[in-house]
Image (spheres, grey):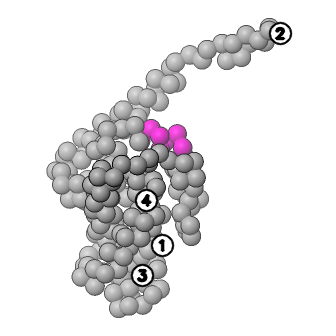
């Protein structure tokens, strides 16, 4: 959404029960919330996103704040749904490996699918998943959620300085992986006809 005045009018409309207001709030964040959930609970991300938006709708009349505060509030709710899900799933283990469609496909009715598709490549998602869980979560909230270190700190119950350190470690680790891959020479293969491939 462009501008605080626009957000305030949309929020007031949604809190007043006007469907278009809630739809606009939903469209502005749903793709990011869903991507955040898909990376951590791929099989149940759609259900968790639905639970998140139901919680948002039921508590919306009590929310007050600007657009940044709303974004942080929605991701806090999404994370709580995710934590509850993880607790439940440890009691009933299952196979949560991503399928290619779950990993790379946009959400149904995703208004920002083209933007998200360019960011969320299979390789990047695989790399983020290999990070330690606390680093991955913070990186996702900072990048996908667009949240400040203070906001992420409130969500994950860590001081903002710790959030910055974990984000720095995650980015450093990813950068080291990319650097190592670029420096590693390709293996040369010679075919029976004498061709050499790098």
Between discs 2 and 1, the one toward the N terminus? 1
Q: Kindly identify the residue that appears in the image at 31 percent across and 81 percent down.
A: 58
Q: Is residue 83 above or below residue 18?
A: above
Q: Nearer the viewer, mark 2 or mark 4?
A: 4
Q: What residue is disc 3 on?
A: 22
Between discs 1 and 4, the one toward the N terminus? 1
Mark 2: which secondary structure?
loop
Within the image, what quadrant is residue 122 found in?
top right
Q: Nearer the viewer, mark 2 or mark 1?
A: 2
Q: What residue is disc 1 on?
A: 27
Where is the C terminus found, in terms of image quarters? top right
Q: Is residue 160 above or below residue 48?
A: above
Mark 1: which secondary structure?
helix
Q: What residue is disc 2 on?
A: 193
Q: Nearer the viewer, mark 1 or mark 4?
A: 4
Which span of residues is magenta-colored?
121-128
Label 4 crowd bin: few (<14), some (14–19), many (20+), radius 10 Å = some
- What label does residue 44 carry, if any? 4
- CB under 8 Å between discs 3 and 2: no
């Amino acid at each position: 959404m462009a501008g605080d005045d626009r957000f305030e009018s949309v929020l007031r409309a949604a809190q007043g029960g006007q469907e278009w207001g809630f739809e606009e709030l939903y469209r502005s964040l749903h793709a990011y919330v869903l991507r955040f959930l898909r990376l951590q609970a791929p099989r149940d991300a759609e259900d968790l996103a639905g639970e998140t938006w139901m919680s948002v709708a039921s508590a919306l009349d009590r929310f007050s704040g600007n657009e940044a505060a709303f974004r942080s509030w929605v991701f806090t709710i999404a994370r709580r749904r995710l934590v509850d899900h993880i607790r439940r799933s440890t009691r009933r283990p299952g196979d949560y490996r991503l399928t290619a469609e779950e990993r790379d496909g946009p959400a149904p009715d995703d208004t920002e699918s083209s933007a998200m598709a360019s960011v969320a490549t299979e390789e990047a998602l695989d790399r983020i998943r290999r990070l330690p869980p606390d680093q991955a979560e913070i990186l996702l909230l900072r990048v996908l959620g667009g949240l400040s270190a203070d906001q992420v700190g409130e969500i994950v119950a860590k001081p903002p300085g710790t959030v910055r350190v974990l984000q720095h470690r995650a980015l450093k680790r990813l950068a080291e992986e990319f650097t190592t891959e670029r420096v590693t020479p390709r293996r040369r293969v010679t075919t029976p006809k004498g061709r050499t491939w790098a």
